[in-house]
Amino acid sequence: MKEFYYDKLLNIKTRGKEENILFNEELFYYPYEPTSYHALEALIKHYEIDADDRIVDFGSGKGRLPLYLHHYFGVLATGIEMDSVLYKAALANKQSYAKKHGTGTGVQFYCSYAEEYEPDPLDNRFYFFNPFSVTVFKEVVQNIAQFYRFEKQTIELILYYASDEYISFLEEEASFVWKQEIRVPFVYHLDHSERFLIYRLNNSI
């Protein structure tokens, strides 16, 4: 029900799962699946977000998360999507959102591989819903850590349904430390993996 309600509210079309048109066996990008609105409700209830934050969504698909967070918090949000078909759908959703709400300039989408994205100095929140293998994840996280190694701002990673490989890398190899866990209330069955994990860059503490 919430999937329909929020898509209608935002005037976008992001429901359903789709196989990515592009598939790279070496890097292994995963199929498109948007973060549920039910989970996003839990995130914004328990995680502090304000208008000064800049969100980057890796594997942004049709643009649900950037548009949702921009709508509720006025944040500047960037979506990175390597699949050109999904990228074009995100652009269409941005246009549709702007038509209804008269805004949307704070949301931008790029058709690019995540590991090729160079952060903006003001980006400070990076979102991942298992968009690719741990090999790509490591490269992206290391790029972020390297880019902000001398910065004093708080840099955080937001992981939804984080894989064991993602968690092991962050806790054993990366320069990020655990900050917060947000459980998503179950609807039909208890799933202990349905949670958000927040990690903060060490040199930002």
Image (cartoon, rainbow, N blue to C red):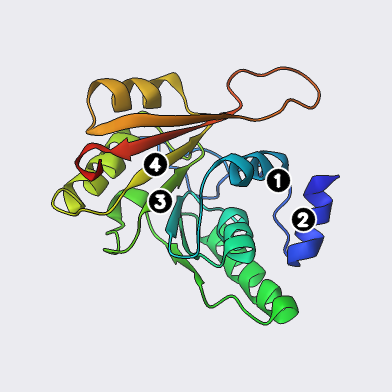
Q: Secondary structure at mark 3?
A: strand
Closer to the camera: disc 3 or disc 2?
3
Residue beneath the point at 51% across and 48% down: 48
Q: Which mark is residue 157?
A: 4
Q: To which residue does mark 1 refer? A: 37
Q: To which residue does mark 2 refer? A: 6
Q: Secondary structure at mark 4?
A: strand
Q: Is residue 139 left or right of residue 4?
A: left
Residue beneath the point at 31% across and 28% down: 170
- Residue type at mark 3? Arg
The answer for how far apart the CA atoms under marks 3 and 1 are is 19 Å
For residue 171, what is the image quadrant?
Answer: top left
Q: With respect to residue 104, does 88 lie above or below?
A: above
The quadrant of the rendering that contains the C terminus is top left
- Residue type at mark 2? Tyr
Which numbered disc flags the more N-terminal residue, 1 or 4? 1
The answer for how far apart the CA atoms under marks 4 and 2 are is 25 Å
Q: Is residue 75 left or right of residue 167?
A: right
Which numbered disc flags the more N-terminal residue, 3 or 2? 2
Q: Residue furthest right?
A: 1
